[in-house]
Image: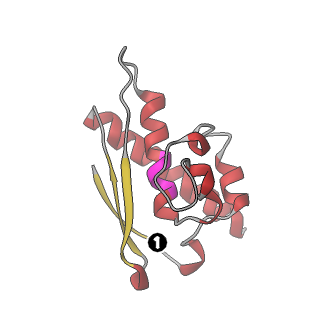
Amino acid sequence: MIAYVEVSDERFCFATPALIADLLPRFPNILSHTCVNERGETFMSVAANTSIPHVLEHLVIDEQARLDESTSKVVFVGKTAWSNRSERKACVQVSYADEHIARQALAVAQRELNDALLARIR
């Protein structure tokens, strides 16, 4: 699944430790996700200051894993990159086993992330 993401405002482009803490009750496994990055082997290594689209990638993966009821657990992988950083546009790619579950996971992840971001500015 490919999601083209546009971050509405520069202040929402990058995660903070407080934002990640706000998301952990709903997505408790994200910090232990394997994550190829320059700082370590897990998402925890970069979570506190990675791009918001990258956070979205991990939330979608986490939600898919939660919703997957198959007996053989699927390993989901993703990749995120800014497609146009100055315009705050990114491409989020996430594998899936079931298209319906993937779409549902994306909707949940997007809603939860938007709610957490907006709560930070209130």
Looking at the image, which residue is at 58% across and 69% down? 14
Does residue 61 sit above or below 54 in this rendering?
A: above
Viewer-proximal residue among 58 and 105? 58
Q: Which SS class for mark 1?
A: loop
Q: Considering the image in quadrants, where does the C terminus appear? A: bottom right
Quarter of the image for residue 32 reads: top right
Does residue 114 sit above or below 105 in this rendering?
A: below
Magenta stretch bounds: 55-59
Give coordinates of residue 64: x percent, y percent.
42, 35
Looking at the image, which residue is at 56% across and 47% down? 42
Looking at the image, which residue is at 43% across and 77% down? 88
Quarter of the image for residue 81 reads: bottom left
Q: Is the magenta region chiefly helix, strand or loop?
A: helix
Q: Which residue is mark 1?
A: 7
Q: Is residue 29 left or right of residue 109?
A: right
Give coordinates of residue 94: x percent, y percent.
34, 48
How many marks the image carries: the answer is 1
Looking at the image, which residue is at 62% across and 66% down? 49
Viewer-proximal residue among 66 and 95? 95
Quarter of the image for residue 20 reads: bottom right
Give coordinates of residue 73: x percent, y percent.
39, 23
What's the residue type where badge 1 is placed? Val
Q: Is residue 75 left or right of residue 13?
A: left
